[in-house]
Amino acid sequence: MNLLNQKGIDKWQGVGVYPTPFNLLDDFSEFVLSKVSKRMNSKNNSIELLDIFSGDGRIGKSVSEIIRSKNGVNTNVTFIEAMRTSLKLIKPKPNFTILHQNVFEIKSTKKYDIVVSNPPYLVLNSNTSESLGIDWNFAKKYSKNLYALSILKGLEMCSDDGALVVIAPFGYLRGYESIKFKEKIEEECSEVIIKASPLRTLFEGVNQDIGFQCFYKRSKGDKSPTYWSFGYNGHEASEIKEQINVQVKNHDRSRSKMKVRVGPIVWNRSKEHLIGFNKNQTNCVLVYGANIRHDGELDLKVKKLSNRQFIKSSGMSNGDFIKKNAILLRRTLRGSPGNWIVDSTVIMEKEQAYTAENHVIVVELEENNTFKELDSIRRILCNRIEDYYSISGSPTISTKIVELLSRNIR
């Protein structure tokens, strides 16, 4: 891990910390046990268990106890945590090693049979990376998120043929910024199993996709393709469809016949130019996400938008206008993980002057399609988006993903 940390352990107090709810501990421990039991049977009667970013050690203690009670295997447990106040809550035992350290600074050669963690969740930028002593170029490469860097560190500390099991977001599965992170996981792991929750509120004060995730570290010399499986709670994990992912991962350069962009207008920065309908003035329709319906309807009679549904031409630049036939997508998916719904509509360039607010994705077509053809393309594109994001915990649609999905639509 090319992490440069010269800021001191004190900088990590409370960073990205969301303690594991006690009502998740038993389920998570059972998940760990179910994924590592067969591997433990081939080992001696004692295993090395590591809990990184351990907090008060509740995960390591719970997993250790269930392994001992149900498999009869003794565990030597190592807890590593930067916050001393949390570590003091772990009562010492003969089989416990308690380390007050920043996990990212550890360069130990010791490897562990099982690594468990509820890693810190924090989206990084250049400033936060610098303050924590993390190399920003490294963070950018691997999704700009602290939990992703934590997973990679956990894999580094895991023995070959061992397992890393975490409670963490699974948004990287469909995140454009996580391509390199996912490739690194495939380099390190023979198999990844994800048991995802359709709820985004498992942690108090957090609205975040969360899943139990098991990463099996490759044995030496193993070059087989990584097997990915995914299932929401209550559903057996099954292999993830990779057809679209392959296109994303390989950075397909074939040119789309559609131009994809975010709506150019930020309404609260253009307040002085916004007006309601005025039959005596020729103004441009400003389409908001709330105007777009799932059935393809464009509803321009939304009451809360009535006094700002149009924008004066004087408040726009030439590039703000939608100049071609276009498909408009609400930038936020509706529904819930596993059942996301895309709201969309079509507009024809000759009907009216249009622009869009930045909660809308604009897909402009180069060809002059009829309304029927345009609506057919809309349906195909929406089906692709819904299929792609069905295993995503995040409701936000990426313009880069839409651009990739728009290719080869006839």
Image (spheres, rainbow, N blue to C red):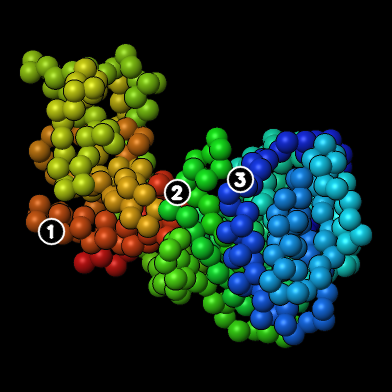
Q: Tag on residue 373?
A: 1
Task: Give the percent coordinates (x, y) of residue 340.
Answer: 33, 52
User: Is disc 3 surrounded by few (<14), some (14 to 19) or many (20+) residues within 10 Å?
Assistant: few
Sequence-first tag of 1 and 3: 3
Where disc 1 sits, the SS reads: helix
Sequence-first tag of 1 and 2: 2
Give the CA distance from mark 1 to mark 2.
Answer: 37 Å
Identify the residue under disc 3: 21
User: Which one is in front, 185 or 53?
Assistant: 53
Q: Residue at x 36, y 49 (%)?
A: 336
Q: Are marks 2 and 3 in contact (CB under 8 Å)?
A: no
User: Is disc 1 surrounded by few (<14), some (14 to 19) or many (20+) residues within 10 Å?
Assistant: few
Residue 256 appears in view: no
Give the CA distance from mark 2 to mark 3.
Answer: 14 Å
Identify the residue under disc 2: 199
User: Which one is in front, 393 or 406?
Assistant: 393
Q: Residue at x 60, y 84 (%)?
A: 224
Task: Give the percent coordinates (x, y) of residue 388.
Answer: 37, 61
Task: Give the percent coordinates (x, y) of residue 102.
Answer: 83, 47
